[in-house]
Amino acid sequence: MNAPEPVTADPEPHVMHTYARLPMAMSHGRGCWVWDTHGKKYLDGLGGIAVNTLGHAHPKLVPALQEQIGRLIHTSNYYASPLQESLASTLCELSGLDRVFFCNSGLEANEAALKIARKFGHNKGIDRPEVIVYEKAFHGRSIATLSATANPKIHAGFEPLVEGFVRVPLNDVAAIDEVANTRPNVVAVFLEVIQGEGGVNPATMDYLRAIRRLCDENDWLLMLDEVQCGIGRTGKWFAHQWAGILPDVMPLAKGLGSGVPVGAVVCGPRAATVLQPGNHGTTFGGNALAMRAGIETLRIMQEENLLENASVVGTALRAGLVRELSGVTGVVEIRGQGLMLGIELDRPCGDLLGRAAEAGLLLSVTSDRVVRLVPPLILCAAEAEQIVAILSPLIKSFLQEAVPS
């Protein structure tokens, strides 16, 4: 097989410039490591943005997907799908919920959740249903999901936004109480258990329990976006399970297929039958390859005890970052859980993306000032310490030379 051509100054003259790419392209990966087309090696602290649950070229996943490609990739949702039923059954068992709709991405899963909320409201006789959403939230880039998202930069140029969203601050129960007393058309609360793109901001466990109670009292749906923080990333299958609650609607994606695009909406009894034939659908969603990827991902996670690994190695990674960065001027907070961590600085730090790559580490900067780490769940303790050893001096050096804005 011929090696890919190295990236040049203008590597994609025919591709829409919707991404501010770094001047590098990846060739192949093994475990938590990837190599670019020039042969340089990187420790993957980004995991394809929380997607590559099993890392790269996992020796159990690869042959399973090869076998599936040789058998069946896609037919149609006109027919029953044993693979869909198998993956849905596992997700229901792990979540305690009842039914699953499969799609292709987190955006599609969140879009489906919003449709469920509106249909739920219309079924109750509410003509203009409203959904509570959050400051710093991110739910996608379709017109509806970007309207639910809080970032003005994502809104800009795509107005008018979709109506029907009521925005509140995270972890403020009084704000929800006020909405309950003043907005009779509210039908659902929609939040990320840990905000990802908004800066790795966790909802507190007490807040999640309070919102569950309020949803029950007001006959609202509790819709928990677990697209980024779910599938074992925090050390439990789903981040809300730390609070001991059940949602009514739970969108999933990212890590569910270990790199094969797949999304899902998992619903409890109050939401499981809201959508009926003709209300929603998808061409590619639930195809055989994506379903096999989800089945194998969950099976391998269980076999290799990756939930415990995410918890133990994530705790070690966070402890190492705290050890090296606590008290450093310019470091505001280190937060998150398991292998979803954010390091907030007191100034924009987008330059660290390129600097880390030069030093052999892949990561991201989100919400302008937060270094985000979401590595594969197979990360080992030694690799976690390597992340600390590479990243800590980069942050210290950056803070010494950069001026807060």
Image (tube, helix red, strand yellow):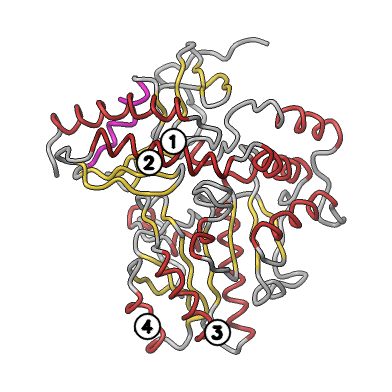
User: Crowdedness of circle 1 by 10 Å Cα count: few (<14), some, many (20+)?
Assistant: few
Q: Quadrant of residue 314?
A: top left
**Does the magenta-highlighted stretch encompass residue 353?**
yes
Q: Which residue is mark 2?
A: 372
Q: Which residue is mark 1?
A: 17
Residue 79 lies left or right of residue 27; in this view the side is right
Relative image position of residue 258 (x, y in whole percent)? 62, 38
Callout 1, which amino acid?
Answer: His
Callout 3, which amino acid?
Answer: Asp
Q: Which residue is mark 3?
A: 219
The residue at the point 69 percent across, 25 percent down is 59
Badge 2 marks a residue whose secondary structure is strand
Residue 165 lies left or right of residue 308; in this view the side is left
* Quadrant occupied by the N terminus: top right
Q: Which residues are magenta?
A: 348-358
Distance, label 1 to label 4, CA atoms, is: 43 Å
Circle count: 4
Callout 2, which amino acid?
Answer: Arg
Residue 330 lies left or right of residue 162; in this view the side is left
Distance, label 2 to label 1, CA atoms, is: 23 Å
Distance, label 4 to label 2, CA atoms, is: 32 Å
Distance, label 3 to label 2, CA atoms, is: 36 Å
For marks 1 and 4, the one nearer the N-term is 1
Q: Nearer the viewer, residue 70 or 238?
A: 238
The residue at the point 49 percent across, 18 percent down is 36
Relative to 70, is 128 above or below?
A: below
